[in-house]
Image (cartoon, helix red, strand yellow):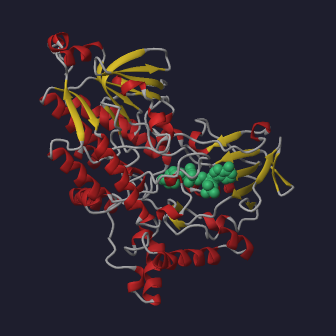
Amino acid sequence: MSSAQSSPVERIATEGYDVVVVGAGFAGMYMLHRLRGLGFSARLFEQGGGVGGTWYWNRYPGARCDVESMQYSYSFSEELQQEWDWSERYAPQPEILKYANHVADRFDLRRDIQFSTRVERAAFDERSNSWSVTTSDGKTVNARFVVLATGCLSNARKPDINGLENFKGPVYHTGNWPHEPVDFTGLRVALIGTGSSGIQSAPVIAEQAKHLTVFQRTANFSIPARNAALTDEEREAFRKNYPEIRRFAREVARNGIYAQQPDRGALDDDADARRGKYEARWERGGLTFMYVYNNLGLDRTANDTAANFVRGKIAEIVSDPETAKLLQPNSHPIGTKRICIDTDYFATFNRPNVSLVEIKTNPIQEITANAVRVAGTDHEVDALVLATGFDAMTGSVAKIDIRGRGGQTLNQKWAEGPKTYLGLMSAGFPNLFIITGPGSPSVLSNMIVSIEQHVDWIADGLVHMRKHGLATMEAGRAAEDKWVTHVNEVAHGTLYPQANSWYMGANIPGKPRIFMPYIGGVGVYRQICNDVAAKGYEGFVMERAVQPEAAAAS
Ligand code: NAP
């Protein structure tokens, strides 16, 4: 498209880029690679100083992926997946970041990436059918297409806690951790938040700090990771079976993870058989705990059997009965908030230098210069760690001033919740794609499986447009409405909406309560996307450029 030919569509491209990609995480990097391979000109803007996205920012102690390394990796290059050696069952953050850098070098991506540059504004010009993209360095470029690869969990959220700004010691957020080493030796540390990030970091901070006080609002379900070094034999077995493993992850497994699938519901087994299966999965460790049975996300009685099992394990691990009771989750069905995967989280509360403060019944009153005040008691600390999560799925998109047809902003359109067709596009915003956007399986899946599917689908769409001389592609309003309704219906057929989760936007005061990801499973979703494309991009509106002569005559 970037060649200097004569149609208006092509002339625009020579003044800028065919595509601007926002974000150099796993989504943006693969998008850039595909675009280049197809002969599109592309520029990628990344606000961080390097590639890796979530793995660039989340450098907190204990950060590691909760999807197994051999599966949390790109599949698009056979050479890449055969040559890279993962060291552990669950890769630690530095190793994933090293992998991201390796990919950037191996595919020579950096020459088209501008680092330390935020995209601040993107406005669609209806006359030229192109986007004008303004960046934090004050420059504006034109692009026919914009792809938002801004990530689902990339907008770290500082909580509105009274007095936070008065704290005299260092304040860290797990989602925006310093690049320099942080040493807690000899310090009293407060950790606020007990989601995946808090649960991963607590045991590691506790080993270093003089004292760790964990402030827990909602107790969470967590399953042991059983992390271990990968042996050569394990790596080899994966490599040999990659074609089948990847196919299964894309087409069969609901969450994009190759694992044994359940063949029955929890109530189809008697109590002894059930306990045996839960024990086996607990011993194996990891996310697949939730795949013992096929109805844990659907039937509350079935779910209770798994939840009771985990509550029992917590009581076995934690020596102090009162602490154990506080750590046992009771507010939501197991799995309806993202299940956590830990290494020694519950056992950490048996350490003499760790204490738990429950803040559901007595919320934090205030943070003072040197303490966290709860129910009139000052818990004195030297450092604060906020593991308080993200404005998930929409937060990073919302930070960009995006203006579509008629000058409408995406934030205006999404004021009552995100609306997309297939999570990929939003009506009124032509030629603007979102990778793993709200309305797609994204955060309910192995992200890399979902990322590769979206990138390939978008790339195919652009090739289709080029082949047919099309200038714009846009979600149709009727198709979008139908999809939003479908996403909602599928979610409400499950137990998921029963939790006040970030899936529901419930962690952000004032954010509309809409179940954002598509829960139908990655295989079903992929088939829907493929069918839509096969039917000539059914539900999307695709238009040719108006030729200057025709425009002048009208
Ligand atoms: P999160 O799941 O949203 O957890 C945030 C925690 O902070 C919750 O315990 C929350 O309590 C608490 N909190 C928030 N605001 C608070 C306030 N004002 N006062 C007191 N407590 C407050 O965030 P996260 O742990 O960073 O994880 C987010 C997601 O990132 C995960 O679910 C997962 O998908 C992903 N992640 C993955 C990994 C991995 O691969 N291993 C690691 C980290 C994160 P409430 O529950 O009461 O709101």
Choose between 185 and 112: the one closer to the eye. 112
Residue 173: x, y in percent?
Answer: 63, 42
Residue 96: tell me if it is visible: yes
Q: Quadrant of residue 274?
A: bottom left
Please count the marks in the image: 0
Give the residue at the far left of this rendering: 467
Specify the quadrant that holds the N terminus: top left
Q: Residue at x 59, y 75 (%)?
A: 311
Residue 531: x, y in percent?
Answer: 18, 50
Q: Residue at x 68, y 47 (%)?
A: 385
Specify the quadrant that holds the C terminus: top left
Q: Residue at x 53, y 48 (%)?
A: 512
Residue 455: x, y in percent?
Answer: 29, 40
Q: Quadrant of residue 352?
A: bottom right
Q: Residue at x 37, y 53 (%)?
A: 485
Give the residue at the far front of this rendering: 554
Q: Is residue 223 above or below residue 394?
A: below
Choose between 406 and 340: the one closer to the eye. 406
Q: Quadrant of residue 174?
A: top right
Residue 192: tell me if it is visible: no
Residue 66: x, y in percent?
Answer: 46, 57
Choose between 470 and 458: the one closer to the eye. 470
Choose between 399 and 139: the one closer to the eye. 399
Q: In the displayed structure, does residue 313 sit left or right of residue 80? A: right
